[in-house]
Image (tube, rainbow, N blue to C red):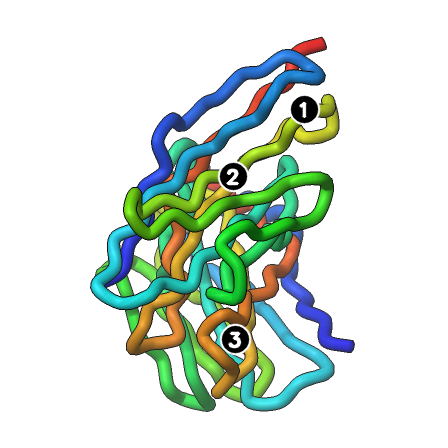
Amino acid sequence: AQSVTQLGSHVSVSEGALVLLRCNYSSSVPPYLFWYVQYPNQGLQLLLKYTSAATLVKGINGFEAEFKKSETSFHLTKPSAHMSDAAEYFCAVRSYNTDKLIFGTGTRLQVFP
Amino acid sequence: SQTIHQWPATLVQPVGSPLSLECTVEGTSNPNLYWYRQAAGRGLQLLFYSVGIGQISSEVPQNLSASRPQDRQFILSSKKLLLSDSGFYLCAWSPTGASWNTEAFFGQGTRLTVV
């Protein structure tokens, strides 16, 4: 069964610093991976998704993620953090034989001025 | 365009009272529907998903149930709430029969506090 693991429940960065949120997947077949963002008391919004067309995926708000099969990773990055990036971020994988979307436990990003 | 509506936005209920949360999708037909719960510090837990009217799969044994009386309506219910049912409940949909890289679209959530 597919699953994702997010390392680090909390990440803190200074405004302008690099953002790196980690996600590792477990799958015996090529996975379909997603990153979502959640602002306080709101639903989830898709940031980007891996579609196997390219290993480096660019999303909204300046975020990008790189699929690395050798490391079973799909880490989310942004070169320069902005205060408005403070939110919770979820990595997810679509189950291969069902339509279920399985989420990681999330990483809360704090951005300090 | 497709939209998803979820209500109420917040709810405070006493222990032992019933629960009904409703979710509807507009602009599509025969969607896959999902209920997730988000407890503090525990990420998103898939509770139920449905691939069609009357077809409900339960992921976690619990005090909750789900129903899909109409194609684009998904209801989360409980006969008697427990304190542990408190959390943020999210409804989501995805296109049925779509490619595997199709994402799910989320409602704005319901904050349930059981007191």
The subunit carrying tag 1 is A
Q: Earlier in the sequence, mark 1 or mark 2?
A: 2
Which tag is nearer the camera, tag 3 or tag 1? 1
Q: Image check: B104 left or right of A40?
A: left
The amino acid sitting under disc 3 is Phe
Left or right of residue B54, residue A72 in this image: left
Mark 1–mark 2 Cα distance, whole angstroms, equals 12 Å
Q: Do marks 2 and 3 share a chain?
A: no
The residue that label 1 is drawn on is: A81
Q: Give the numbered dot on residue B74.
A: 3
Viewer-proximal residue among A4 and B112: A4
Give the numbered dot on residue A76: 2
Tell me whether circle 1 and circle 2 mark residues in contact (CB < 8 Å). no
Could you say whether the residue bearing mark 1 is in a helix, strand or loop? Answer: loop
Residue located at (38% from left, 47% from top): A68
**Marks 1 and 2: same chain?**
yes
Q: Position of residue A87 (x, y in %)?
A: 61, 32
Instruction: Give the SS element for disc 2.
Output: strand
Q: Chain of mark 2?
A: A
Q: CA distance from mark 3 to mark 1?
A: 38 Å
**Between tags 2 and 3, which lies in front?**
2
Residue at 48%, 87% in the rendered image: B97
Disc 3, SS: strand
Q: Chain of mark 3?
A: B
